Amino acid sequence: MHANFLAPLFLGTFPLVMLGLFLAYRPAVAVMVSLLAAEMFLPPLYALPISPSWLTKWTLPPLVAGILVVIFGRSHLRRSHPLRGVEGIFLLSIVVAFMTFLTNRDPLHYGRVVLPGEDLKDLLGEVVQFFVIPWTAFFLGRILFKTSRDLKSLTRLLAISVLIYSALILIEIRTLPDLNQLVYGYQASRFDMTLRWGGYRPTVFFKDGLPLASFVLTCTLMILAMARVHMRLAHVSIKAASFYVLVVLVICKSTGVVLYALLIVPLICLAAPRRILMVASSFVLCFLIYPVLRFSDVIPVKSIADLFAGLSRARADSLLYRFNMEQLMMDLTKHRLWWGWGGWGRNLVYDSYSGRQISIPDGAVIITLSAHGMVGLFSYYFPFAYTVLRAPKFIRRIKSRSDRLLLSALTVNCAVILFDLIVNSAFPPIYMLIFGALCGLPAGILKEEATQAIAVTRGDAGLAVEYEPAPDEAAHRKPRVGVRVPTGG
């Protein structure tokens, strides 16, 4: 990868942009805009040419955001202990990283290819990256997003993002998917990977077209929820914007994303929150039991792939290929089931004689499972799954209809993101921040409503009797009951 000078310049100076955002906006908005802008505009698959070598657009912004929240958002930190929330479960991943290190000190030999065992440097790098993502991104979402105002800010920012980014998407549809080449001097993915539906799909500044389409879907679902609750977006017609982003979603040319949209869009537009939350929980339960079912060889992968043959033979073959690659890696994982094979390519399948790599993984589930085993898989993803499964408990008690609908849309959005990790691997920090927001918002809005109810109750308790002479009575005074309207909580 030969990037030009703009890649290190933009990535290296992005912390200054984030500082400006924190100076201009409250911490919740500043963090959200920072992670959105990083995902949308910074160079993909590129790390700063300094040590440590893992400073990318997925690690540098959350790290800087955590530091800036310590400086500008101390009040949020005082109210929330970092080890008392659901993200405390992430700490089990440190134990997993240590156990993976202990069980993978041995080198692996495949013909002339030798993969070295893990060392202390690998362990340290993995632990530090873990604290940056997912821990920091999730924690910031949980502590910064607490109120109805925060929920609406999050929704509006996602809507604005897709409307802005749609211009770049349309440019690539009209020309070629080469904006990353023009700006940063390199292609993040092979051109043949962009060929879809008789043409090519946009990638803009994402590593390929799949994560871009998933990002557009995430924003689209929230802008549809905005339309349902009649939220305003400056001078933009929210209904026209909803129709427009649906068109943009289709021209991203991702069959899987379009199928998700066909299922979820009608729910968000028409269904009651209870129905939406039931579907969200079903997605997450399927995600949690999928590895167990695959190891048990219960899932009929060939039949599932054949279902897509009616839509596209190419897409059916692609899905079957992913299942076959996944099976190869699962067969390897069985030999180190609990702690995995470690990273740096040790978790992949190679030819025993030539050393040629055979497996090409796509799904985040199989990548995490093969690298860190069953314990690592569930310690990493359980907080995200738990966040979705616990949301209905709080959402159904929220009185505001608009907040219930927006939270239901956010919940099913997160469920789709999690479920999609079975076949795709993109899980950027902005998604982790959204999961953290979903963890904090329902309980926070309930508390906000309870505080408002107490304020109203205290106002009613301030009844007073005011006396004034009746106009037609000179000798008698009639009591007139008046309510003193409270001016504060």
Image (cartoon, rainbow, N blue to C red):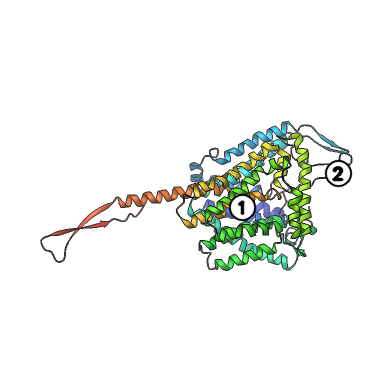
* Left or right of 205 on screen, residue 482: left
Q: Is residue 155 above or below residue 438?
A: below
Asked if residue 432 shows in the view, the reply is: no
The front one of 31 and 272 is 272
122 or 173, which is in the foreground? 173
Residue 455: image x %, image y %?
36, 50
Q: Left or right? Give the position of 181 relative to 95.
A: right
| The label number, if any, that marks residue 429 in the structure image | none
In the rendered image of this protein, does residue 146 appear above or below residue 235?
Answer: above
The three-letter amino acid code for the residue at tag 1 is: Leu
Q: Which residue sits at x=89%, y=39%?
A: 353
Q: At which x and y percent is residue 343?
A: 74, 40
How dense is the environment of label 1, judged by Cα within 10 Å: few (below 14), some, or many (20 and up)? Answer: many
Instruction: Tell me if label 1 and label 2 are in contact, CB under 8 Å.
Output: no
Instruction: Identify the secondary structure beneath mark 1.
Output: helix
Mark toward the viewer: 1 or 2: 2
* Residue 333 position by quadrant: top right
Task: Identify the element where label 2 is drawn.
Answer: loop
Residue nearest the observer in this picture, 304 or 157 = 304
Q: Do we see residue 92 in this rendering?
A: yes
Measuring 62% from the left and 67% from the top, which residue is drawn there?
244
Number of numbered discs: 2
Q: Which residue is drawn at the image coordinates 56% and 55% (left, top)?
A: 409
Gap in angstroms between the C-alphas marked 1 and 2: 37 Å
**In the rendering, at what x and y percent does residue 191 appear?**
79, 59
Tell me the number on the disc at residue 35: 1
Q: Which residue is mark 2?
A: 356
Front-most of 19 and 260?
260
Q: Residue 356 location in percent, x, y?
A: 86, 44
Residue type, label 2: Arg
Mark 2 or mark 1, which is nearer the start of the sequence?
1
Q: Residues within 10 Å of mark 2 (few under 14, many from 20)?
A: some
